[in-house]
Image (tube, grey):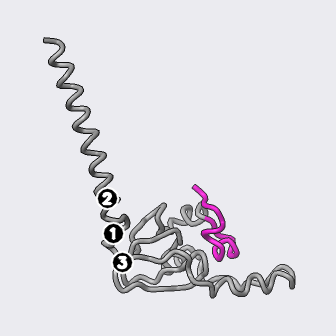
Amino acid sequence: MVLDVKFMEWAASQGLDTAKLRAAKVPIYGKWYYPELPADVELVNLRSGEVKTFAAPMIAGATLWAPKADLEAAGLWPPRAGEPATPEEAPRLAPLALRPSLHPIAPFGAEHWAPVGTFAILLVYLMVIVGLWLAMYTMLLQRG
């Protein structure tokens, strides 16, 4: 699965995509791959190129991360110097690395759904189970 470039702007500028990272056996952390960001590991934000270490395990959002050590071992780090293709692109590319993530990262174990949403899902699940049980019970009674 190769994700849209909008989640990997910096990586795309380095000539990287998910297929190349997977071929190099570099783990990709994000909600589509490994959703838990490890603690005390230098991770590279594939959207901005920022290197960050988290003190505690975190749940990843849409932003994708890759371990810096694995990128180095695969020969994909340090990043190559990015020269804008044309002078018109320079103002557009410059703020990209400084832009904060649009998807905040929640601490590991934090609720992702509101408690009311979780209760509603469990209630529907329970209703389906009870409904199936009642349907089977009714069929058994009709058979005699």
**What is the quadrant of residue 95 in the picture?**
bottom right
Disc ID at residue 99: none
Dots 3 and 1: beta carbons under 8 Å?
no
Q: Report the mark closest to the observer, 2 or 1.
A: 2
Q: Is residue 85 left or right of residue 63?
A: right
Q: Which residues are magenta?
A: 1-17
Q: Is residue 113 left or right of residue 5?
A: left
Q: Find the distance from the CA under tag 3 to the CA under tag 1.
A: 9 Å
- The three-letter code of the residue at mark 1 reads Glu
The residue at 35%/59% (across/down) is 117
Above or below, comparing residue 19 to residue 12 in the picture: above
The residue at 40%/72% (across/down) is 59
- The three-letter code of the residue at mark 3 reads Pro
Q: Which residue is mark 2?
A: 118
Image coords of residue 44 (percent x, y): 53, 80
Disc ID at residue 111: 1
Q: Which residue is mark 3?
A: 107
Q: Report the mark closest to the observer, 3 or 1.
A: 1
Could you classify mark 1 by the number of other residues whose Cα lies within 10 Å: few (under 14), some (14-19), or many (20 or more)?
few
For mark 1, give the secondary structure.
loop
Which quadrant would the N terminus be assigned to in this image? Answer: bottom right
